[in-house]
Image (cartoon, rainbow, N blue to C red):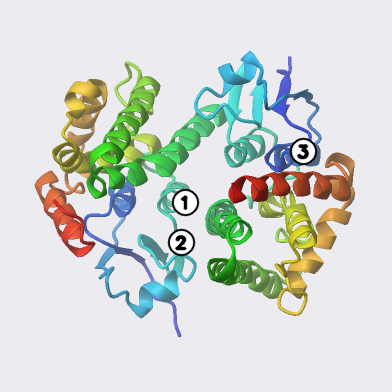
Amino acid sequence: MAREKGVVLLDFWVSPFGQRVRIALAEKGVDYEYKEQDLFNKSEHLLKSNPVYKKIPVLLHDGKPICESLIIVQYIDEVWSDKAPLLPDEPLARANARFWADFIDKKVYECGTRLWKLKGEEQEAAKKEFVEIFKLLQGELGDRKFFGGETFGFLDLALVPFVAWFYAYETFAKFSMDEECPKIVAWAKRCMERESVSKTLSDPNKVYEFVLFLKEKFGVEY
Amino acid sequence: MERSVKLHGHWASLFVHRVQLALHLKGVKYEFIEEDLENKSSSLLLYNPVYKKVPVLVHGDCPVAESLVILRYVDDVWKDNPIMPVDDPYEHAMVSFWCHFVDNKLSKSFGAAIRTSGEEQAKAIEEFHQNLMFLEQKLAEKGSKFFGGEKIDMLDIVIGCGCHWFKAVEELSGLKLIDPNLFPHFLEWKQNFIESQEVKEVIPPFEKLTDYAKSIYKKILGHDNN
């Protein structure tokens, strides 16, 4: 079977991992075909393209699949290297960006999920942990405009899609990111001034509705 | 003037071995600082405040933590004997993907297989086999000595440095983790790795590591039974 030419993204509208890839493609001005996937009834195309994890996002470049959002973003950065560099050039800065992106991947989504899935003491523990995670990230950001310094880069892109989930997390777990991590909230506003980010991130109200849908589907009381 | 290279580690840590092997393959001289993991040095805690773990590479006075991040850093700085594909973004992405797979999906399924019992364990072992089969097929397709071809690459380093655990668990528990009939290429690759000159020059002897892994495994079993 002939390989389909061009760039195709298999994705799910609200996925923060998929949004990382969409932001990267927008930053680089790459034309691509977006294919929305039904995650509750996965297509043959998705299962064949990502047999290991069976997850989105998957980028297909001239028919060849690349999986795992941060790996896809680094691939995009290397292929379309003429515009908007995402990873810094300097090895130590690259290592730092990779370290913190890996930290975000290990901690943020899983902890965030516990904020709406659990109740009582377990939810309180998750809230404490979530705030600690973002306080660490806030420390790493310091007084810089972006995690990348003056320019928006890899680490900013790795984290910013989760900002759309703050409203849902704050509502279910009863806390305020503006109070707990004001520098992160200010950084998020600066990111949203970029078209690649503002046009990609989900509306926080829609994310909240999606979490309500998940709670109903998985039988979590609310 | 060249900056100093120090590696905070522990003689038996497979994560530390990864970095030692990469530095050795590139001919980089470094000072090894053995850490007492029950009583970590103030330097280690300063250099890796997030996880407080080994390995940490300190280049000049700049620390780099997390073994996969360190391996990429070493490859970025010292260009001799690359451990990642050069000038090939797709192959680069593939090696990154499989290294991430080893440290996430494969190792989680291995952990589940050795920590559970009964029906739960049977399921966990089946999942481990499904995961290992991806690597078996990769080796069968490639038909070469290592994942990196004739030379060791980052994926060889990442799986190779942990492979003594399979033997340790099989010998201690009697579990048939890696059936030679199902995984002939993987077992051949494993022999190639542990017998390679560079690996023997830097990694402690396979038998010594297997014994150490058994002592850790005994503690895990003892702890889980309490």
Residue A68: image x %, image y %?
44, 55
Quadrant in the picture for residue A164: top left
Q: Distance between the residues labelled 2 and 3?
A: 34 Å
Amino acid carrying mark 2 in the image: Ile
Location of residue B206 in the rendering, given as x and y in whole percent from the top left corner: 85, 50
- In the image: residue A173, left or right of residue B216: left
Disc 2 and disc 1: Cα gap in Å?
Answer: 8 Å
Mark nearer the viewer, 2 or 3: 3
Q: Does the rendering let one see residue A128?
A: yes
Callouts 1 and 3 in the same chain: no
- As helix, strand or loop, the secondary structure at mark 2 comes to strand
Q: How crowded is mark 2: few (under 14 residues within 10 Å), some or many (20 or more)?
A: many
Question: Label 1: how many residues lie within 10 Å, few (<14), some (14-19) or many (20+)?
Answer: some
Q: Is residue A132 above or below residue A168?
A: above
Residue drawn 13% across and 44% down?
A204
Residue A71's mark? 1
Kindly identify which numbered label has been placed on residue B12: 3
User: Helix, strand, or loop for circle 3?
Assistant: loop
Q: Which amino acid does label 1 sit on?
A: Ile
Measured along the vertical axis of the image, is residue A30 above or below residue A91?
below
Who's the residue at 17% across and 49% down the image? A202
Circle count: 3
Q: Name the residue under label 2.
A: A66
State the image quarter where residue A108 is shown.
top left
- Mark 3 surroundings: few (<14), some (14-19) or many (≥20) residues within 10 A: some
Tag 2 and tag 1, C-beta contact below 8 Å: yes
**Whole-percent x, y for residue A21 in the image:** 34, 52
